[in-house]
Amino acid sequence: MWKSIASNALTLLIVMLIAAAALVAWGRNEFVKVGPLETAICLRVEPGASLSAVSRNLEERGAVSDARIFRIGADYSDRSDKLKFGSYLVKQGASMEEVLQQITAGGASSCGKEVNFRIGVASHEVVLRELDPETQRFVEVVKFDPAAEAPAEYTAAVAEADLRYNVIVVEGATSWQVVDGLRKVPFLEGEIAAVPAEGSLAPKAYDVVKGSKREDLLAKMVTDQAAVMAELWPQRAADLPYDTPEEAMVMASIIEKETGIASERADVAAVFVNRLNQGMRLQTDPTVIYGITKGEGVLGRGLRQSELRRETPYNTYVISGLPPGPIANPGREAIAAALNPSDSNYIFFVAKTLNPADGHVFAVTLDEHNRNVEAFRALERAAAAE
């Protein structure tokens, strides 16, 4: 009898061990296999959140099949107390292991909201955006002038600890305009002692931390612009009509102000290089305007004939060669165009239509250019008659 009981007990123990092993194997498979999430979601982990609360949230939103298995997996891998607050993009089909790795590794939030402060030529603006987890594209929440009262949506968003911040400097902004914009950025701190040299700031998007110093960001812009020129200068074409990086930056700034269309920057560069090589004056309006405004704001009107005839260091209708310095902060592509213009004989260009986005039409001869100008004047007259 006792032998029978012992045998049965041993059999039961073996069965239980096999069942336990099978259960562990099943749980392990559930933890690492493709998850049930059908559409990506944005998971926000609040500061001080518990693993229990996060796992329930994941289960309720269909991101994990079983909150208990998620917690057991976190305990087993010694990560149950390593949650990092933030907003995380949980992708379709993410496994429990992948989700746990996301929310315990930390780093920059991969979804949620961000604030972009855009420093423009004519104005500045603040844009609050939020990532749509389904399309994985940012959707504008609200946009406003920094001089105006901040909307409620923005005020609520800046209270979130994981909100991301960016400062975007557009290509062609002057150094004065950049400094003017930075002084209005509400999430930066500190004074700016002086306006940096024209052309010395790299126009692009900068990730910043709330409370960063404005002077530090300006220094970053100077360093990045110098790095761009240092990289591209050795790759320049032969026989350019300028001998130094400083002169190339002047040319790049003129190209930047003449066109915002990437595909025609090299042709615009060719026009000015061909003119310099032939001893012609550049005759470009943006340099004349800079001589009037000194880069402080925009002119806001057309140039007068008296201004086109007045001799100033920046009036390229009167002076020969390049003006004494840059007239804006050119982007990388404009610098590249100045150093490697297209292989063309273009000498002239004029706007194709009244819409700047349509670009320019180029010409080799004066007769061809005059016909292009007349076509443009006809468009102006037609628009004025409407």
Image: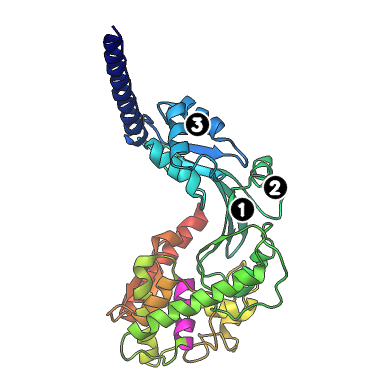
Q: Crowding near pointer 2: few (<14 within 10 Å), some, many (20+)?
A: some
Q: Is residue 257 magenta?
A: yes
Mark sitting earlier along the chain (2/1): 1
- Could you say which is closer to the camera, residue 302 or residue 209? 209
**Residue at the extreme front of the image, as rendered:** 2
- Vertical position of residue 131 compared to residue 174: above or below: above
Instruction: Name the residue that disc number 2 marks.
Output: 150
- Which mark is on residue 126? 1
What is the CA distance from the residue labelled 3 to the residue labelled 2?
Answer: 36 Å
Residue mark closest to the camera, 3 vs 2: 3
Residue 112, visible in the rendered structure: no
What is the CA distance from the residue labelled 1 to the residue labelled 3?
Answer: 36 Å
Q: Are marks 2 and 1 in contact (CB under 8 Å)?
A: yes
Q: Crowding near pointer 1: few (<14 within 10 Å), some, many (20+)?
A: many
Q: Amino acid at mark 2?
A: Ala
Mark sitting earlier along the chain (1/3): 3
Q: Is residue 364 magenta?
A: no
Instruction: Name the residue that disc number 3 marks.
Output: 55
On-image quarter of the N terminus: top left
Determine which quarter of the picture holds residue 282.
bottom left
Majority secondary structure of magenta residues: helix
Disc 2, SS: loop
- Could you say which is closer to the camera, residue 350 or residue 144? 144
**Residue at the extreme top of the image, as rendered:** 1
Q: Amino acid at mark 1?
A: Val
Q: Is residue 190 left or right of residue 67?
A: right
Q: Is residue 161 left or right of residue 269?
A: right
Residue stretch in magenta: 246-258
